[in-house]
Image (cartoon, rainbow, N blue to C red):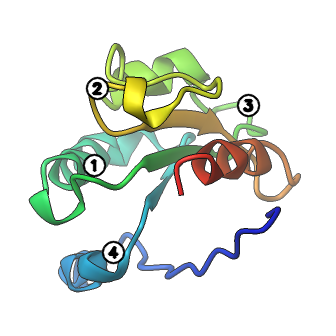
Amino acid sequence: MGKLTFTAFDLGGHDQARRVWNQYFPAVDSVVFVVDAADRKVMSKVVYELDKLLNDEQISHCPILVLGNKKDRLDAMGEDELRYSLGLHGRTTGKDKVPRETLMTRPIELFMASVVRGEGYGEGFRWLAQYL
């Protein structure tokens, strides 16, 4: 994207994969946390894992892009509902270009996406790129 090249590790969300997430932390510059916006049943587990990431000192400097995937599904949460469900209301830093030095915290923002339709994730990665 532009002059940036992203190298991504898909660490998955199953229990075994989550146990090794922190082994990657020393080598990361940012975190992209993908949430299934249509799966309300797992939301408490998602909130728990996101909170662990937000509170981990190893990545306290890293901007975090939260992607609410599957926005194309009729049963998917909208952006406001997902933001509230994840406990991000009042914690995100804005979708505009906000200089990092003016932020009181690390950059974090939620973007709704549909990977199947190719929507939303580009906007999210452009937001993320300004902090790398």
Residue 69 in the figure: left or right of residue 106:
right
* Callout 3: SS: loop
Whole-number angstrom distance, CA of label 3 to CA of label 2? 22 Å
Q: Which residue sits furthest front?
A: 101
Residue depicted at x 27% and y 49%: 50
Whole-number angstrom distance, CA of label 4 to CA of label 1? 14 Å
Residue flagged by tag 1: what amino acid is it? Leu
Q: Earlier in the sequence, mark 3 or mark 1?
A: 1
| Residue pointed to by mark 2 | 87
Residue depicted at x 37% and y 26%: 103
> Which mark is nearer the camera, 3 or 1?
1
Q: Earlier in the sequence, mark 4 or mark 2?
A: 4
Q: In the rendered view, would you say 4 is above or below 16?
A: above
Residue depicted at x 38% and y 19%: 84
Could you say which is closer to the camera, residue 34 or residue 26? 26
Q: Are marks 3 and 1 in contact (CB under 8 Å)?
A: no
Residue 35 position in % (x across, y down) = 49, 50
Q: Earlier in the sequence, mark 4 or mark 3?
A: 4
Whole-number angstrom distance, CA of label 4 to CA of label 3? 25 Å
Q: Residues within 10 Å of mark 1 (few under 14, many from 20)?
A: many
| Circle on res. 50 | 1
Q: Earlier in the sequence, mark 3 or mark 2?
A: 3
| Circle on res. 14 | 4
Residue flagged by tag 3: what amino acid is it? Leu
